[in-house]
Amino acid sequence: MGQEHRDIHIRDLVLWTENPRDRVDPNASDQTIANRAINNDDESRWKLKKFFKTMGNRYDLSELPTVVYHGSKPVVYDGNRRIIIGKIIHGCVENEDANYFRNFDYPKMIPCNVCDKQTALEHVYRKHKDDSSWKHLQRDIFNHVHMKMPKSLFLIFDETTKIISNMPKMNQRFVKEEILTRKNLQTLGFYADDGVLKSNHKNDEDAYHILGTIVSLVKNKKLDTRENRKVLMEKIYEDSLCKEILQKLRSKDNPLSLLPTQGNVGTPVERTEAPFQLTREGSAQMTKRVNAKKPELFGTIRPLRAGSVNNLYKDLRSIYKERTKYSGHFPMIIRMGLRLLVEVAAEDVSTEEGPLKISKFLDKYEKDPRITFTQDEKSTLFAQKVDKKRILSLLHIGAHGYTATNNLDQTVALSLIIGKMLELSHGK
């Protein structure tokens, strides 16, 4: 179809779920993406507020978003940050930080460059292949998924370990080009085979310790682009356990060669959704994920229909935000509030048999395929041993003053699932 200019209303433009900056579930709403853009603002993915400051005091009509129609939906392939800001300003999505974007001249009708998908992808690639608005991992993902390029070693490393995704400091050019090179990884006992990172170490603990040490060296700037450049092996050998592991790897007693040979040599590094949790300088152990930033109650803002369910939902969010004012028994209030919220929501759902009980409400929504979780949410649920099958028992515990009721992290994890159920049962 080539390209053409077309004016499209801000409310009709659809944010791109495949945006390499922050890929989300294909069914994610504009509200979900906007929430992530604000909530991840300090993690260098979106930098939405910093970007807003560069826009001046009016929308620049010369900067056309690139749009591709998916059926009847105009999806924004390039310019998502500008469109998110416009949706916040015009109330197309709700956001608690909306006042930050006030006093800005933003039109409702947006001139767009409408084109076919391939043309749009070529434009996106040209604009972002060398700039700094995408990090290196995001650029590699785009190249592979959309430009059909082979997976880079950097991407293979992350898909297997999740280290780069979960640790922004590892998503640097010098890490990609000077540390996680094919030669370095082979020297340390790792190699890529059929799109998966594999290990020649006899046990997982040795592999985890080596990888964790690399993370520690980067995090503590023992490896950087200034004074400590290209000294990976020297720094690795300063760790006595790493030295012992690598000597053992090269010993005659190890039947595995350092480099891959023909046949099924080596074993895949265990896939994990959790990053390495550093325990001391130069060492690491694999543990459940611990988020540096505690997730909000219910995860993100979910616009619900007006009524008692929405009122309770907003009250609990408000109370949770003021949690530092209360005693150590405060989590019990939130856990009991979650049970009350689900009970009220269940009674508000009408069926032929009348209002639902809590158990019937959970049965109705817990298996709904529309309920999906991000990688961070999955890690949070796993760490707190919260899954759909345990919701009822965890809510019942909340009706009593048990010690478990005082576990705030588990309560927040539980709220993630409840929030998604409410979005289905009482969403606008």
Image (tube, rainbow, N blue to C red):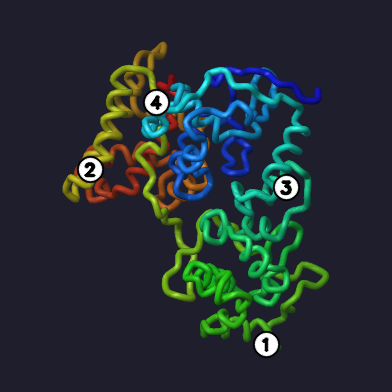
Q: Residue at x 45, y 39 (%)?
A: 38
Disc 1 marks which amino acid? Ser
Q: Going by the image, does 78 lie left or right of 289?
A: right
Residue occupying the far top of the picture = 352
Q: CA distance from mark 4 to mark 3?
A: 46 Å
- Residue tagged 3: 143
Nearer the observer: mark 2 or 3; the answer is 3
Q: CA distance from mark 3 to mark 1?
A: 40 Å
Is there a contact, CB below 8 Å, between mark 2 and mark 1? no
Mark 3 packing: few (<14 Cα in 10 Å), some, or many (20+)?
A: some
Q: Residue at x 29, y 33 (%)?
A: 339
Is there a contact, CB below 8 Å, between mark 4 and mark 1? no
Residue 149: x %, y % from top left: 78, 49
Q: Going by the image, does 380 lie left or right of 320?
A: right
Disc 3 marks which amino acid? Asn
Residue 327: x %, y % from top left: 16, 48
Indicate whether 224 appears above or below 93.
Answer: below
Residue occupying the far left of the picture = 327
Mark nearer the N terminus (4 vs 1):
1
Mark 1 packing: few (<14 Cα in 10 Å), some, or many (20+)?
A: few
